[in-house]
Amino acid sequence: MRRTRSPVRPVGRPRPIPGIDSRERLLNAAVTLFARKGIAATPIAEIAAQAGVTAAMVHYYFTDRQRLLDAVCDERLLSNVNAVWASVAESNASMPDVVRTLVQRIMHAAKLQPWLPSLWLREIVSEGGQLRERLLSRLPLGHVQTFIAQLTTAKRRGEVTASVEPRLVFVSVIGLTLLPLATMNIWRRIPQLQRISHDELARHAESLLLHGLFAARSKSRRRR
Amino acid sequence: MRRTRSPVRPVGRPRPIPGIDSRERLLNAAVTLFARKGIAATPIAEIAAQAGVTAAMVHYYFTDRQRLLDAVCDERLLSNVNAVWASVAESNASMPDVVRTLVQRIMHAAKLQPWLPSLWLREIVSEGGQLRERLLSRLPLGHVQTFIAQLTTAKRRGEVTASVEPRLVFVSVIGLTLLPLATMNIWRRIPQLQRISHDELARHAESLLLHGLFAARSKSRRRR
């Protein structure tokens, strides 16, 4: 690693500090700007400036724009996806607990990383999103398939609302968490909705999903 | 209206047929292309070609690109919004019926106009969407506010699940209808989800919402 640099540097440029911190700061700057302006409208130089390093440092760590997008995918998106879905693998948890944990982990991830819902909407979900193919080809679909299988078994045992479709539940979880978070700027224009907090949103999503999905379960419990 | 035109026309150009049909065909071509490629990537000439008229006809009916977008907003989007929300105004309907009708009307509109969910996602919900401000400034927010007020009253009467937030229900309705429709190309890549039909999606959304929102109601009914 080149740790020494020429002492003659252009005035006003931030001093590049090589090492882990600069790389992490660059990734953080990238996701923040990508979420705010979109990937296509964000020049490398702006990411570098936001991270307090020179544009040359972006090339030093990521070689080119495509490798930077790969790193965003692996180290900022897939890391979140894996953390969120890890709960599904814990096979001894009940289905309501699995769903509750899924919702809580998505909402928690979005609270710590406010750029996440917007980046999801802009660059993954939207047609032509620059992270779409990159992320989809790497997604651990096994988690979703395990989740569907678990729900299907639970439904067969009468524990899931009869008219609910187990295969669509993970799409519903996303529609009740990431979508409202990503569209907050729109619905907050309605006066009554201006003061809704992140926690109220999380509670609402969890409540709607648990009552909606496991209505059958609470009924059969009450019948006993 | 000018019904007669010069008989000398460039070879190969489709014959412009003035009148309601061409204008409607142009609007239909516009929403279809906008949904597929995005507004920024759709030239006026392509809309005209798709509608089988000359580019001059677009100017004849809409003057310029901005007026065409205004017409898309008024005649293709707001018309749908008004049709969907009309059920809320029918004050004698029960809240579960209002929610059921909302879901059914959104799903029905998207079935008849397959471009709708994609255009919603691309050009209204996404930051920088070209129909966003145009539509939001014209939205009849009174409908949403009436809906929130009705749900709040129903919740006070113990008819709505206690932990559900009445102000967020319309965002949930959209997250369970338009979002899964607009992202079908993504989740259909999962083998188990390839064959899910529009009607299964509609049934799932309705079931999840009705059980989730009105769990309290069915409990109190059963207690009687």
Image (cartoon, coloured by chain):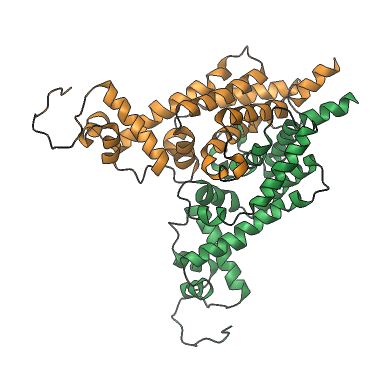
Chain colours: A orange, B green
Q: Quadrant of the N terminus of chain B?
A: bottom right
Q: Position of residue B183 (x, y in %)?
A: 56, 42
Q: Position of residue B58 (x, y in %)?
A: 50, 71
Q: Position of residue B192 (x, y in %)?
A: 61, 32
Q: Position of residue A52 (x, y in %)?
A: 26, 32
Q: Which residue is located at x 58 percent, y 19 percent?
A: A88
Q: Looking at this view, name the residue that lies furthest to the top.
A: A92
Q: Nearer the viewer, residue A94 or A207?
A: A207
Note whether residue A105 is visible. yes
Q: Which residue is located at x 76 percent, y 44 percent?
A: B98
Above/below status of A154 relative to B35: above
Quarter of the figure with residue B154: top right
Q: Looking at this view, name the residue that lies furthest to the right.
A: B224
Figure label count: 0
Q: Quadrant of the C terminus of chain B?
A: top right
User: Horizontal placement of A97 versus B212: left or right?
Assistant: left
User: Horizontal placement of A161 versus A64: left or right?
Assistant: right
Note whether residue B189 is visible. no
Above/below status of B218 relative to B171: above
Above/below status of B164 relative to A1: below
